[in-house]
Amino acid sequence: MTEQHNLQRRGFELGNITTASTQNIPSKQQIIEAWQADKSIVVPAMGLHGIQKHNNHIQIAHQMMEAMLEGAELAETFETSAISQCLKPEFALLASSAEEHDEQGIEKVYFDVEQNAEICAEDLWCKASWLSFHDEDASLRFRFSFGMEGFEDVAADPARQTWAGELCERIFPESAIITKQPEILSLLKEILGNEPQFVERIVYFNAPNGGAQFHHDVERGHAGVVFAQLSGATFWLALDKQRLIDEIILFSQNNNVSDGLKALLQNRKALSDYMEERDHELVETLIDQNPDFIRYLIDKGYSHHLQAGDILMLPQRDLDNCVWHSVFTLGGEPGEALSFAVR
């Protein structure tokens, strides 16, 4: 059985797609080999049992998302809901701030951790943000970390990152669908050669007309990302950076592209470096806004359709060898998802 969908994101109409409603389940060896080869791979329905177990928590998370869209304050939600009981006794809510310096930021809530009357971890936070600047994209993300944003280093301070992960687990108990899933932990142990640690956690609500543009998640101390679709559905384009560069070059040889991009394509290293810049409009216009290029990547087999219960593995080895990925929301309702970096 197949399903028809229209790809829309941030005001761009990006074509129609047909997806299969069922997918083949890869073997453990196929999953390990894909990760080692810097390839994304979907494990269908691996999280389905966990979703059934945490269905009530997922419903509560949707209620929180809807309250935020209606203007509720995140800190007040934490203090007045059942979440306040989940935070006790270790997590002390200290303060919140409106992220006026960040156009996408909504609110950041700060916590300390107390054990045996002593503070053992300071300046942890949960930050709610818009996923884009587009007025018709209501996608939200809740990110958990510590210290000064943009400078936190999980490799240098694993203890605080561990407590930031625990904070995520208290507020979103459905996090256990990844972190307590024996099959996922076993796979990651074989891939990494040691017990996996989840070092940065983001809870997404991708809304209609929303989703992330092409990017990677490389960061010191990260080996990759495990993504779990908990509700709703998403459509992904995902391929490692070197293949993406190859496909940009091949597509541009047979299709009209801007003169600026043509000039950039003459030097592969310059193109690679430019893609790492915050503003890479020459490439963004092609890979995120051109329906012909998106169809080209789909036809080459670089796409995934994620439904509730599906797990996606995204290796992020280094800047030159990492999976770049782009996300589209399918259907008419927001869906919850977990995106946890692992080391």
Image: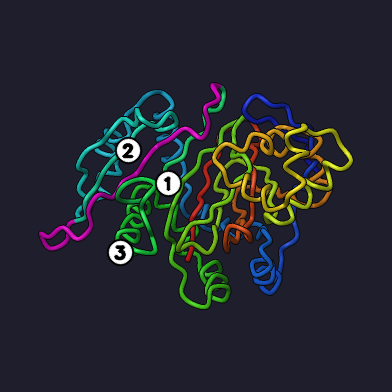
Q: Name the residue furthest right.
A: 254
Q: Where is residue 277 in the image (x, y as percent from the top left)?
A: 56, 43
Badge 1 amino acid: His
* Colour setting: rainbow
Badge 3 amino acid: Ala
Badge 2 amino acid: Lys
* Residue occupying image coordinates x 40% and y 29%: 68
Tag 3 secondary structure: helix
The residue that mark 1 highlights is: 57
Residue 126's disc number: none
The residue that mark 3 highlights is: 159
**Which portion, as a residue range, is magenta?**
114-135
Mark 1 and mark 3: span between their CA atoms? 26 Å
> From the viewer's perspective, is the residue at label 1 or at label 3 nearer?
3
The residue that mark 2 highlights is: 108
Which of 124/75 is in front? 124
Q: Earlier in the sequence, mark 2 or mark 3?
A: 2
Q: In the picture, residue 248 is in which quadrant? A: top right
Q: Position of residue 65 (x, y in %)?
A: 44, 34
Q: Position of residue 56 (x, y in %)?
A: 44, 45
Tag 1 secondary structure: helix
Q: Earlier in the sequence, mark 1 or mark 3?
A: 1
Tag 3: Cα neighbours inside 10 Å, few (<14), some, or many (≥20)?
some
Tag 1: Cα neighbours inside 10 Å, few (<14), some, or many (≥20)?
some
Q: Name the residue furthest left.
A: 117
